[in-house]
């Protein structure tokens, strides 16, 4: 049946995404650096600085909850989580903010746990790892999260609308959904250069550096298929979020974008 076919196709997609990330887990950082010429680090720094995670004890009242409860979805190797904890501690003088890193792939989580040993946060109640599908976060109670982050993850989800509704469910009223993701380049000349880079150079780098052309080819195609800035902004609205301003910020001419939504 049509329904049966769809289910098989979706299961295959999930399997394929799983295989891609298991295959790239150990070379993940090197590949990100090569593919983005190191720029992904600047985007991630900007993303976190702009969210300003943590509650400064000097500027908040003593009746307020100490620290934020953050959920970093598709958090993989912990890139965003470590930055958020560093920011909360050093910029906001907040030693209470907690981050739960959730990812569907055990190999990416294992890499994250390993890397956490080199930070001040493991073992610590401020950082935890959980294997979970963004579309079904049963272990996270309703209205319990202050900030939900997802960086370079959502384009891999099978049902993005379902994941957005789960984000809405777990956030507290006033809580923020923040997404850093590849997006659409907004200059035609730049777009031509970018397309040539992504469709020719990235799979080749994948083949030479990670011995895995197919996974990197998949990554490029998933970027191409992901909705435009306005399309994704509208999906966030459809999930029930209020969208501040125009709803997104372009990074490096739209190669990536930050989208935000607030749960009313
Ligand atoms: N956030 C990290 C970063 O910025 O470096 C990792 C991003 S990595 C490109 C994408 C991650 O999404 C992978 O670790 C993958 O396992 C995870 N992922 C894919 N589908 C998922 C799903 N349905 N639920 C949770 N995580 C998922």
Image (spheres, helix red, strand yellow):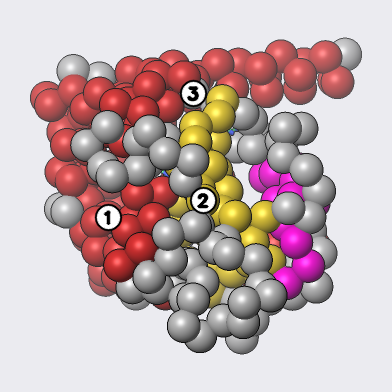
Q: Is residue 233 above or below residue 198?
A: below
Q: Is mark 3 within 8 Å of ligand 1?
A: yes
Image coordinates of residue 85 in percent, x first then y, are 39, 55
User: Which residue occupies 54% across, 63% down?
Assistant: 67
Could one spot residue 211 in this view of the protein? Answer: yes
Residue annotated with mark 2: 98
The reply to whether discs 3 and 1 touch (Cβ–Cβ < 8 Å) is no
Indicate the secondary structure of the residue bearing disc 1: helix
The reply to whether discs 3 and 2 touch (Cβ–Cβ < 8 Å) is no
Position of the N terminus by quadrant? top right
User: Which residue occupies 49% across, 23% down?
Assistant: 105
Q: Is mark 2 within 8 Å of ligand 1?
A: no
Q: Is residue 56 above or below residue 25?
A: below
Q: Point out the stretch of residues depicted in magenta.
A: 160-174
Between label 3 and label 2, give the one nearer the viewer.
2
> Which is nearer the N-term, disc 3 or disc 2?
2
What is the spatial separation of the Cα atoms under label 2 and label 1, in whole angstroms? 24 Å
Q: Is mark 1 within 8 Å of ligand 1?
A: yes
What is the spatial separation of the Cα atoms under label 3 and label 2, in whole angstroms? 21 Å
Residue annotated with mark 3: 105
Q: Which residue is outermost to the left?
A: 208
């Amino acid at each position: 049946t049509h329904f049966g076919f769809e289910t098989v196709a979706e299961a295959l997609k999930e399997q394929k995404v799983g295989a891609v990330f298991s295959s790239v887990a150990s070379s993940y950082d090197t590949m990100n650096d090569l593919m983005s010429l190191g720029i992904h680090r600047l985007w991630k720094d900007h993303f976190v600085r702009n969210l300003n995670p943590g509650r400064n004890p000097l500027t908040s009242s003593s009746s307020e909850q100490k620290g934020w409860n953050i959920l970093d979805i598709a958090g993989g190797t912990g890139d965003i989580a470590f930055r958020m904890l560093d920011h909360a501690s050093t910029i906001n003088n907040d030693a209470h903010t907690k981050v739960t890193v959730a990812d569907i792939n055990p190999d990416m989580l294992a890499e994250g746990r390993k890397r956490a040993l080199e930070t001040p946060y493991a073992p610590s109640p401020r950082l935890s790892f959980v294997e979970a599908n963004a579309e079904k976060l049963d272990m996270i109670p309703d209205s319990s999260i202050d900030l939900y982050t997802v960086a370079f993850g959502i384009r891999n989800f099978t049902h993005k609308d379902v994941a957005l509704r789960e984000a809405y469910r777990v956030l507290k009223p006033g809580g923020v959904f923040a997404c850093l993701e590849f997006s659409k380049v907004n200059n035609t000349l730049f777009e031509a250069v970018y397309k040539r880079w992504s469709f020719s150079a990235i799979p080749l780098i994948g083949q030479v550096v990670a011995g895995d052309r197919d996974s990197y080819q998949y990554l490029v195609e998933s970027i191409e298929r992901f909705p435009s800035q306005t399309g994704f902004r509208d999906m966030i609205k459809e999930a029930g979020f209020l969208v501040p301003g125009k709803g997104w910020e372009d990074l490096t001419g739209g190669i990536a974008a930050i989208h935000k939504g607030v749960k009313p």
